[in-house]
Amino acid sequence: MISILKKIGYTLYRIWFYILVALPILVMLPLLVLFTMSEKTYAQFFWLARNIWANCILYGMGCFPKIKREQKLIKGESYMLVANHTSMLDIMLMLKVSRNPFVFIGKKELVKIPLFGFFYKRVCIMVDRESSKSRTAVYRRAQRRLNQGLSICIFPEGGVPEEEIILDNFKDGAFKMATAHNIPIVPITFCDNKKRFSFTFFSGGPGKIRARVHKFIQTDQLNMEEKIKLKEKVRTVILKDLEANCK
């Protein structure tokens, strides 16, 4: 049974999160609008999102990133970034993981979030998972962004699973896209985001948030059998890390 004081604390923590999401956007609004008017200035938008917006939220919430890397991203190279998805903090932590500018592919429902949704619509690739036409359009837009030297980020579970599920089954999209464009897959484990700020309202609190960047998986020379097994191979890497190191 959660006490009244704890419920008040959790509620204030939630409210503070949304203030931290909105406040930097309002302060930087002219620059954000300017840098989202053209795809040519996306790198500048990404810099602001990574170094100001994400930092304000994570450090303002008392969530201190601790990132371990088994392999480093090379500047100017394109990658497929994939991680487990448990929290809204995943977006901010992913921005801290990669200095290389990348584009999120995510569900269109996030457009409805006030203020955040305005920029989400302008800079992310939205997908309606119920529409095959939408999924086809995603591939075309991703190809264009990769041609511009950007990376792509997808949370391959296709949404946030129930809290008791450690790691849900992966959808095919990220892996088909990576093999189609011959870009390396970067498996990433987020350990603590569910503990710090899950989708259960009366929960969460400050502390470290760990991320592990695993060795990249090359896709340019895979045979058909290896391509079929690729999704489960990546999922196994993340799942084993969650079970062994994220308790």
Image (tube, rainbow, N blue to C red):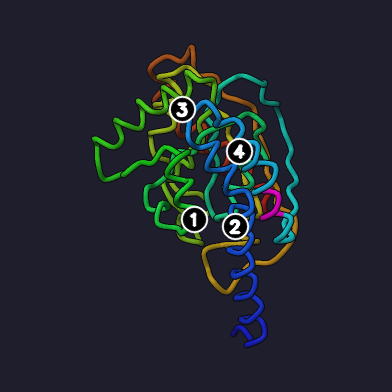
Q: Position of residue 86 (x, y in %)?
A: 54, 54
* Marks 4 & 1, CB-CB < 8 Å contact: no
Please tell me the numbered disc located at residue 188.
4
Label 3 Cα crowd, 10 Å radius (few <14 / some 14-19 / many 20+) = many
Tell which tag, 4 or 1, sits nearer the viewer: 1
Badge number at residue 115: 1
Mark 2, other Cα within 10 Å: few <14 / some 14–19 / many ≥20: many
- SS class of the residue under badge 1? loop
Q: Quadrant of the N terminus?
A: bottom right
Secondary structure beneath dot 4 equals: strand
Looking at the image, is mark 1 or mark 3 earlier in the sequence? 1
Q: Name the disc covering residue 230, or none.
A: 3
Q: Is residue 62 above or below residue 154?
A: below
Q: Residues within 10 Å of mark 1 (few under 14, many from 20)?
A: some
Q: Earlier in the sequence, mark 2 or mark 3?
A: 2
**Quadrant occupied by the C terminus:** bottom right
Residue depicted at 37% across the width and 53% down the height: 109
Three-letter residue code for mark 4:
Ile
The boundaries of the magenta stretch are 54-58
Q: Secondary structure at mark 2?
A: helix
